[in-house]
Image: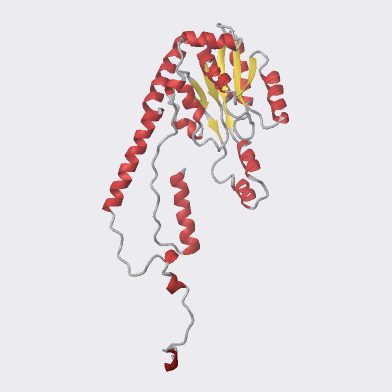
Amino acid sequence: SMSQLLDRKEVYLRERLGASRIVRPTLARIPLGVHVEDFVADAGTKKIARQAMELSQDEIVFLFVGRLSFHAKANPLPMYMALEIAAKKCEKRLTLVQVGWFANDKIESAFRESANALCPSVRTVFLDGRDAVLRKQSWQAADVFTSLSDNIQETFGLTPVEAMAAGLPCVVSDWDGYRDTVRRDTDGFLIPTYMPAPGLGSDLAARYEDEVDNYDRYIAGTSLFVAVDVQAAALAYERLARDEPLRRQMGRAAQQYASEVFDWTQVLKRYGELWSELAERRKAHVPPASAEPNPSRDDPYRFFPATRAPHFAPRIESSAL
């Protein structure tokens, strides 16, 4: 996405300003990190967490963590519909725990009413994600993590990485940053996600450029044209609900991958490698010799010259000596 953006920006600068020399920044792909050890939990810890959250041991607990916003994070409709289909097919007790926060009471009412209407066969629990204790218990108590994000803001998405650190299989939309963290059919399932073809969103961009829409409305309008495959999500939910060995297998693979790639010890190594590379580039670079100083830091006596007569010399009377 960044390479495409820079390509288009270069064309724009050449056409508009006649730019002939454009230097690109270094594009290093370094992910956000997590402390994996903070998320690791054994069977005993999981049992205690479930008891604290009043979850029975036979419930299959699906977990969503993040902002509870249908226009700026993820519309819950496909998640609710898919869980309802899975609950009816697998004949197991499915529970959806949603950990996050609402921007206002209207959005909270919409979430609660939608859950009751769209997935009545699934027990739904809402918890305040700003409470660190509840958030940690949720990671420990869950069986499966799911997030069917449909918003262009999800350029990375940290919660799937946290879920992998917790040893949870992931069911996420095949979307934006998620597809770069969750490995398909290894750490979980990537659900097909659809959007209009390039060129069909220029009206949305124009409304935002002209300030007809603010950023909030721009991303909301964009996400309205994004669809997540409900049937594919339902199949993934059902398969993981039925198959405990598969949940354990994917969870172990995800946790190992998180340790090898996303733990801060690994991420900081990549920063160190980047810093070393940049240092070598600086050493090898010889700046061009120039007689002219940097104009933004010019000689102040040249930039603000005093006004005086060209051949003025002060007259000094002999009596003054």
Q: Quadrant of residue 186?
A: top left
* Residue 19 position in % (x across, y down): 44, 62
Vertical placement of residue 19 versus 105, above or below: below
* Residue 132 position in % (x across, y down): 56, 23
Residue furthest bottom in the image: 318
Of 265 and 182, nearer the camera is: 265
Residue drawn where x is 48% and y is 61% of the image: 15
Vertical placement of residue 93 versus 253, above or below: above
* Residue 58 position in % (x across, y down): 56, 6
Residue drawn where x is 46% and y is 56% of the image: 11
Q: Is residue 275 left or right of residue 60?
A: left
Vertical placement of residue 306 versus 96, above or below: below
Residue drawn where x is 48% and y is 53% of the image: 9
Residue drawn where x is 64% and y is 25% of the image: 77
Of 13 and 30, nearer the camera is: 30
Q: Quadrant of residue 134?
A: top right
